[in-house]
């Protein structure tokens, strides 16, 4: 399983999840989180699964209302109704959880600042530590093994469960709350107690390779990431190539993915999607760089909004896609408020690339298969593409 941010995973993610027009996922396990900005939320999201009739949303709402009237948990009743619906990506969130997801998409989160992945054998390994975060201050570093969280062993657990343990319950995950991590480095094993803090994400990083090639790495599509990509392209050396690294990108805000596409396209179609059969279209802004050589790197952790962007660049002939088949997540969810303020989501449609390809369940096949030395392979491809004429 490829690495994932341990600070922005939906806590009910094992049952699927997201916000509103979401072509986003947070874990290879298959959950998604992402959304349009508040002003654009008309009730659409992305998930994998068959379209769900509006009546199912009413069934979930009715189940929650009946449970509330009987003094029982409306969230649990709604979850049972979603489970019975057969919707793979249907989910129910408490008000606090939903608020956490929205904050993560805004590039803010409460956590300790760890990235980690599950290795073969079920071991959880720290892959990155955010500079200045509680984890960094405590001396935790990449390569350390995470053995336990508050005394609970994490070996063999899905990363989603590890995330839940790190974040704590919705009422206990506030900044300043303590969490004890069991760690291992070589032959040393120790416990480290850190306090969660309010942190911000750096979802877009930029670096230069020899020869002037610019590598733009997008970890997820949080607020502002699309503009960060456009700025990076404008500031890249003239006549040089760009490597757009979407490996392990879990998705995010679809509007940010469209903005990122606008960095390389001069208007035109990015994707289409349907909501209960009504077709909608997403278009790039005018004025993008349409001549600079471009390679997009993808893998099995490239999901949802990242697949939407990849499909647009591939179909429009704008990028050579290098890597392995993407995850295959491209459906639309409709969120609705339940009587107690919690949020239920069910699948209502799917999105397609500009050529009409469906991504859901199939993913995107790269133009060139590669699973090792990806940056080097991308450099080779760029050298063959040559400078813009």
Image (spheres, rainbow, N blue to C red):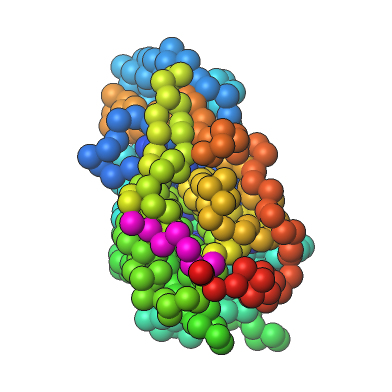
Q: Residue 257: x and y, percent? A: 42, 51
Residue positioned 62% across, 68% down in the render:
385
Above/below status of 311 relative to 321: above
Left or right of 132? Residue 294 is: right
Q: Residue 197: x and y, percent? A: 33, 69
Above/below status of 330 relative to 367: above
Q: Nearer the viewer, residue 375 or 389?
A: 389
- Magenta segment, principal secondary structure? loop
Left or right of 221? Residue 372 is: right
Residue furthest to the front: 389
Total number of numbered discs in the rendering: 0
Q: Which corner quadrant of the image does residue 138 belong to? A: bottom left
- The answer to if 292 sits in the magenta stretch is yes
Q: Which corner quadrant of the image does residue 120 belong to? A: bottom right
Q: Residue 277: x and y, percent? A: 46, 19
The answer to whether residue 135 shows anywhere in this view is no
Magenta region: which residues?
287-293
- The answer to if 10 sits in the magenta stretch is no
Q: Residue 298: x and y, percent? A: 62, 58
Left or right of 369? Residue 93 is: left
* Placement of the N terminus among the 4 image quadrants: bottom right
Residue positioned 44% across, 72% down in the render:
205
Residue positioned 54% across, 65% down in the render:
294
Residue positioned 41% across, 62% down in the render:
289
Q: Nearer the viewer, residue 174 or 249?
A: 249
The answer to whether residue 360 shows anywhere in this view is yes
Q: Nearer the viewer, residue 328 or 312?
A: 312
Above/below status of 59 relative to 224: above
Left or right of 150? Residue 254 is: left
Above/below status of 277 relative to 193: above
Q: Which corner quadrant of the image does residue 224 belong to? A: bottom left
């Amino acid at each position: 399983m490829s690495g994932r941010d341990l600070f922005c995973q939906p806590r009910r993610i094992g049952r699927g999840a997201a916000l509103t027009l979401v072509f986003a996922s947070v874990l290879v396990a298959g959950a998604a989180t992402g959304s349009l900005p508040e002003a654009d939320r008309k009730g659409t999201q992305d998930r994998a699964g068959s379209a769900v009739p509006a009546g199912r949303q009413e069934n979930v709402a009715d189940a929650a209302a009946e449970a509330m009237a009987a003094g029982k948990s409306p969230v649990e009743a709604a979850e049972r109704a979603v489970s019975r619906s057969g919707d793979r990506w249907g989910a129910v969130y408490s008000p606090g959880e939903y608020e956490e997801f929205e904050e993560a998409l805004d590039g803010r989160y409460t956590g300790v600042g760890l990235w980690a992945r599950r290795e073969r054998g079920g071991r959880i390994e720290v892959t990155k530590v955010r500079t200045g975060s509680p984890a960094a201050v405590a001396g935790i570093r990449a390569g350390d093994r995470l053995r336990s969280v508050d005394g609970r062993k994490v070996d063999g657990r899905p990363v989603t469960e590890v995330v839940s343990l790190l974040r704590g319950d919705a009422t206990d995950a506030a900044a300043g709350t303590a969490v004890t991590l069991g760690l291992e480095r070589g032959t040393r094993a120790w416990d480290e107690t850190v306090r969660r803090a309010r942190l911000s994400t750096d979802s877009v990083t930029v670096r230069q390779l020899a020869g002037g090639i610019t590598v733009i790495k997008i970890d997820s599509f949080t607020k502002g990431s699309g503009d960060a990509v456009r700025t990076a392209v404008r500031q890249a050396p003239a006549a040089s190539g760009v490597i757009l690294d979407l490996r392990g990108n879990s998705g995010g805000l679809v509007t940010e993915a469209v903005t990122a596409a606008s960095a390389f396209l001069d208007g035109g179609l990015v994707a289409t999607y349907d909501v209960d059969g009504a077709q909608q279209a997403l278009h790039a802004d005018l004025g993008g760089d349409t001549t600079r050589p471009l390679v997009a790197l993808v893998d099995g952790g490239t999901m949802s909004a990242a697949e939407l962007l990849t499909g647009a660049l591939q179909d429009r002939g704008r990028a050579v896609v290098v890597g392995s088949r993407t995850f295959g997540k491209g459906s639309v969810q409709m969120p609705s408020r339940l009587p107690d303020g919690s949020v239920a989501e069910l699948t209502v449609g799917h999105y397609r690339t500009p050529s009409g390809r469906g991504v859901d369940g199939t993913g995107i096949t790269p133009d060139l298969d590669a699973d090792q030395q990806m940056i080097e392979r991308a450099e080779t491809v760029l050298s063959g593409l040559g400078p813009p004429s």
